[in-house]
Every structure is written in C-alpha cells, then in structure tokens.
Image: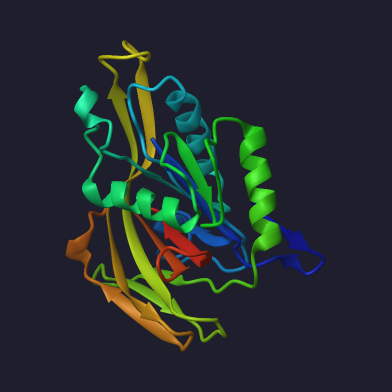
Amino acid sequence: MLIGGEQGPLPPFGHVRIWSTFRVDWRCRSAGRGRRRGRGQARPGRRALGGRALHLAGLQLLPAADALLGKLAERPDIVALSFHIDYWDYIGWKDRFATKETTARQRAYARTLRQKYVYTPEMVVDGRVHQPGITTGQIESMLADARRQSAARTTPLLKRMADGTLRIALDAAKIDGAADVTLFVYDRRHATPVQRGENEGRRLDNFNVVRRFEVLGPWNGAQAHWDVAADRFQPEQGLAVIVQRADQGPVLGCARLEPL
C-alpha cells in the first residue's frame, strides 16, 4: 500500500504473512530487481506491506488465499511472504515446503495475538491483526486496522555488495524495548499439483515461499548493520528483512530485495 502526502510518499508501512497459511506485515520498504533499482539497493520513501503465507494443499480455501497473496506480491509497496505448515501432514497431505520452524512461527503468533488455536489459511498483518485473508475486504480491513495501531517506522536498507554479500543497515531510532532483526529467504513462485482432497486435480501457484529464516541479532535502536554472506542464499531467491519487537511482537519496519 502506497500512502503519501503533499511532500510525496511516506516511509514504508508494513508486512503481510499467510499460513496455509498467510501473514501480512506493512510499513516495509519494497525493492525491485537489482538491475532496475540501482544495483539492488532498496528505494527509500515508499510504504510497503509484508506478508507470509503458509500453504495446505488440500484445503478448499487455499487457492483464494494464494491468489490474493500473488496479487499482493506484485505490488511494489508490499512485502508479501508465505509460510507453509506441517501439522496437516499426518492426514496424508504432506506439504513439500513446510518445516518445523515455519510451523513454530505461526504458533508463536497465536500466543502473541492470544488466539485460541492456529488455523489455515491465516493472514497476519504487521504482527497485530489476523484473519483468514481469503477476500479483498478482509485484507483491506486488516491493513486499515494495522495502520491505525502502528507507530513511526524504522526501515532497514538492503544492498547487494560487489562480492554478493547482503548488507543490512539501520539508522538510529528511538524504540521501546528490544527488537529482533530477522532475514527471510524465499522462492518467488512454485506450481504445486494437488493429488488429493477438495482441490484434487488442480494446480496451486505458490508465491514468495519462505525456505528459511534466521534472526541476525537484537537491535536496541542504535545505528547498526549486518552482513550476510552470499553463500547463505541463491541468486534467484528473494530476500526480506523484518525488524520486529522481541518474541514476535509488532513489526517496526521491513524491506525486501528481489532477485537479480
């Protein structure tokens, strides 16, 4: 979502995720492909959304959530990520992208957001609000709610160095409490044939599928930077960084860098 005023666009605003699953977080900076954005450096002055999606290939509602995530992923002002979960594997619909780590991350959000249970598909916006995220109306409502709740943002700057290293920089900012800086490595798109369940015979297009993530370190508001070696991701993979209050609290800022 691009939000601007008389002086031009405001800083990036958010991040979105989906678990299938799906999450959206916003106030994030979105960068295009390196060749089109000046050697891969994120462009300042944009509000963006970030999202994740967890996928369960047998559920009837997932194609709608996947399709909406794909549209969000195309927007230059949104960081959309999808996370796949493994707790439905036991009934025979094993998700090839699901991991224990992505599943644990959804459960952590359930605790933080005081949910009674986890569910799929689920979209979380800005680490503050959640819904299934299967209609445009639900998504717009969540974005509006998160915008009302969000304070000033701090946006990480992502840049590919000459040797392929990813440089992540944060300017000094006043924050309350500790924050975590987390890197997410994702595949832009996959096509998954569904062999069982309500969607048998269909093909699910999966967008911005998170393959791994790691907490790079804590952040206390001081000017800081982190370097990630090029051997920790592939050239064709996208990269996203989320600055978030500790224990998966509200998102303070985020950015993405598209593949070269």
Residue 111 is situated, as x and y percent measured from the top left of the image, at 43, 55
Residue 212, quarter of the rendered image = bottom left
Residue 243 is situated, as x and y percent measured from the top left of the image, at 45, 69
In the displayed structure image, the side of residue 239 where residue 133 appears, left or right: right
**Residue at the image point whose x is 43% and y is 50% from the top:** 110
- Foreground residue, 41 or 246? 246
Residue 27 is situated, as x and y percent measured from the top left of the image, at 58, 61
Residue that protrudes farthest toward the right in the picture: 6
In the rendered image, the vertical position of residue 193 relative to residue 69, given as above or below: above
Looking at the image, can residue 142 be seen? yes
Residue 249 is situated, as x and y percent measured from the top left of the image, at 48, 65
In the displayed structure image, the side of residue 17 where residue 126 appears, left or right: right
Residue that protrudes farthest toward the top in the picture: 201
- Foreground residue, 167 or 183? 183
In the rendered image, the vertical position of residue 217 relative to residue 140, given as above or below: below
**Residue at the image point whose x is 54% and y is 41% from the top:** 72
